[in-house]
Image: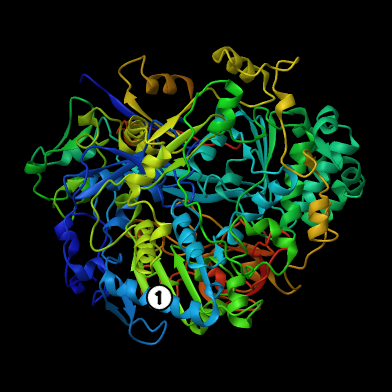
Amino acid sequence: MSKRYVMVHDENKCIGCQACSVACRSINQVPDGVSRLQVRIEGPFGEAPHLHFKYNRVSCQQCEDAPCVKVCPTGAAYVGDDGIVSIKADKCVGCMYCVAACPYKVRFMNPLTRVADKCNFCKETRLARGEQPACVTVCPTDALCFGDAADPGSEVSKLLATKVSYQDKTHLGTKPRLYRIPAKRGGI
Amino acid sequence: MIELCRRDFLKGAGAAGAGCALATALPGTLAAMGAQPLSGSEKAIPSICEMCSTRCPISARVLDGKAVYIEGNAAAKSFGGKVCARGGAGHSLLYDPQRLVKPLKRVGERGEGKWQEIEWSEAYSILAQRLEQIRREHGAEAVAFSSKSGSLSGHLFHFAKAFGSPNTFTHASTCPGAYVIAANAMFGGKVKRDLGNSKYIINFGHNLYEGINMSETRAMMKAQTDKRAKLVVFEPRFSIVADKADEWYAIRPGSDVAVALALCHVLISENLYDKAFIERYVEGFEAFAAEVSAYTPEWAEAISDVPAKDIRRIAREFAKAAPHAVVDFGHRATFTPEEFDMRRALYAANVLIGNFERKGGLYFGQKAAGYNKLAGEAVAPVLGKPGVADMPKPTAKRIDQVDEQYAMMWSEGGIYQSVIDATLEAKPYQLHGWVMCRTNPMQTMTDRAKVVESMKKLDFVAVVDVYISETAAWADLILPESTYLERDEEISDKSGKSPGYYVRQRVVDVIGDTKPSWQIFRELGLKMGMEKYYPWENMETLQLLQTNKDVALLNHIKEKGFVSYGKPLMLREKSMVQDFVAAYPGAHAADEDGSYASLLKFKTPSGRIELVSPKVEAMAPGRGGIQYRPVTLKQPDELYFIQGKVAVHTNGATHNIPMLANLMSDNAVWVHPSTAEALGIKDGDAIRLKSSVGVEEGKALVTKGIRPDTVFAYMGFGSKNRELVRATGKGIHCGNLLPNVTAPVCGMNVHTTGVILEKA
């Protein structure tokens, strides 16, 4: 694998404004009723005045050990040389095994193309043009950082080296490549 | 619902996101026109957003002839090339099947919703004939003209003047008016806040993380992250900005003025204020100090529920961070009739620490002419002002000119709600016509029922809009405006600490039979024989007049979309002055202390900052100085009803846009668990709110993020006309609960009242 693309979501900086989600829908032309990316504002938790929200990014976790890839009977789901979990549309038979296998519940059948769909870091729509994923580009508060974690000089590598981060459901052994910097009161 | 669509426009455009929800398409809409091609630039075109009033620089391109992708224009540094959810969804408005693309004439009763498509020529004939009739019978002043303030409002007001009416209004008195008026009274002009360089920010519910103003939102986040600035938030609701704060106080609605005055009290009584600054620049300090001597933190605690010890500590911390500290003067609040003094009290806290023209404080913008003069050379081009030399000056008095105390508002957009009084009660004289351009008073003004009554009573109502908005639904004539993605406009000033310009440019070719409003009002003017007031032909002519026929400059601005010139400058910031002087050999010499402090002037009658204003005193006796006056916002058995902004919608404008409606179509009412329990209300239950003017039904959101004595709803929802299919009947309509009350001096439409909450 030549590259190891990862995404870091800083929940301190995230304001849950949905700019990422709208940009994702627009550039990837995601149809109504399904979505590749959402940020859910959950809470408030705690007791007043010490309340806090959680800003939960719900999107493909780009697992290194991806259950969706393992169960795909045709090889449509695969991990690319860039580390991005991708889909070969012409090989997808719409069996929905991947949708069922995803422990993060972020895969869906695209109602227009009838192909299994999910976030692919804007691989075709943005990365191919040498641009950052749409969500990263538009984020008003710079809460997202995307890049090659295999390159120690990259911004993501530096960020992961200096900030406390966590991944979702690591106990499943999926090794997600979506990292989260947890929010803490006064943490920004 | 999809099977009910007769013509699936989206198949033609190939775009996702906008299912047709009407069994029969409304006349005049894109759905009724059938599939329309989407042609435009596949190369990103820099332009200006119009999904809210911030008007961020954007960059947009057409994707495969099917959709439009919008992002920020990276050339605009303080905006960071970013765009919010609303801005990113602009294309969803562009090819929404429910968007209006043909002029419409009412054929049923007013508000009945029966429309007939007509040609522009007929629309202009109707407009010209009806307006001329009113002018003949009642005088030109009997027609009111209103527009959301913005790039094209000037064209409507130009027409109004040419027609002869002084009655022009913006939405200022329903939104941003008060802080502008308060700044005019104290400083003689608008001020900006340098949040990005601030080390300590005190915020009274200016929810920059939901009501996104891109450059300020980014600046505040930058201050918090890079500079470790402390953020203290006073707000009755646990908003996103409260969540991101270091300290949050659930202040009692409408008591901000008390806390702000108590902060001033501590600064003065503990000698924490900047005496040199006060001496040099401020009028009325002694009187102000005497007034605030009574406003102790303990006094404020009793009014606001903010602990006195915290107010005292915060004031000390604030003073310690001076001058790189700021009390944010807010945006849309209009909590109480004491709005004017609330804003002045917030400004006063800034004045006391002398943060003017210092990093992290307040400052005046630097426009080209003044900046060049300081630099001693033409650093930035000065734009020409295309105008007509002999424009008529209407002789009739404005309808809001009956009360001298509002004089400062007349030039800032007027008292919008006076249209209602003039129509219903002939105060000061009877209005007969109303011409509107992209404004939705039925949502943004208060007392919706009265707005409806007014619309019914008028002889003639014409509306220019992109949708059959809640207000447009009551018009006689609706003219479809091209969206901002289909328009070219004049170059706009976007100066900050140094001069800057940007321009709105067409990204896609016009869809359907729509026109930009500048063209609509020009063509109407020509139809009515007013050629002499329209010596220009089109937008290109106007742009060229602006650049003084410098084609290269015009092309440069168009190519970049956003250009800024020179070095950032704050007059009292020595390092900035030093850089400025070093960059421009002919620059004005710095003062002995290395700053431009001697150049800081205020355009008030005294030439200084006026903590006490004789001018205001003359206009509104008893109101020259800043003071606390108790207000009654609710009865003892009622709850405070407050509203605010959300990041995915803009006031009364975006709730029908498919992509945004899909994200959020309801405004469940925030209720504290203890209040909910006492009334037997559970999360998601149907509830009813009753105020002195209206009743609304909606859903409860039971949350700890609100005071027990207060309910909150995001504004702009609950449209009552069937035309806005995605928005109608969803959520509660705030304007229907708010009584029509105008705040003294600033003329703001008061937006807090008492409500009875019950299970529906």
Whole-percent x and y of residue B619? 78, 59
Residue B238 position within the rendered picture, expressed as x and y whole percent measured from the top left: 60, 51
Q: Residue at x 20, y 71 (%)?
A: B5
Q: How is the image coloured?
A: rainbow
Q: Residue at x 27, y 71 (%)?
A: B121
Residue B311 falls in image quadrant: top right
Question: In the shown orientation, is residue A114 left or right of residue B215?
Answer: left
Q: Which amino acid does the dot numbered 1 rest on? A: Ala
- Foreground residue among B664 and B103: B103
**Residue A150 visible from this viewpoint:** yes
Residue B648: horizontal and vertical position, in percent?
Answer: 44, 53
Crowd class of label 1 (few under 14; some 14 to 19; many from 20; radius 10 Å): many
Rendering quarter of residue B19: bottom left
Quarter the C terminus of chain B occupies = bottom right
Q: What secondary structure is marked by label 1?
A: helix
Question: Which residue has dot 1 on it?
Answer: B473
The answer for which chain carries disc 1 is: B
Q: Is residue B307 visible?
A: no
Q: Is residue B162 left or right of residue B408?
A: left
What residue lies at 22% left-to-right and 68% top-to-bottom? B31
Q: Position of residue B701 (x, y in %)?
A: 53, 63
Identified at 43% across, 70% down, the residue is: B730
Of B369 and B660, which appears nearest the observer?
A: B369
Q: Quadrant of residue B226?
A: top right
Image quadrant holding the N terminus of chain B, namely: bottom left
Taking the image as shown, residue B734 lies to the left or right of residue B626, namely left
Q: Relative to residue A178, is residue B165 depicted above or below? A: below
Whether A108 is drawn above or below B82: the answer is below
Query: In the figure, is residue A133 to the left or right of A160?
Result: left
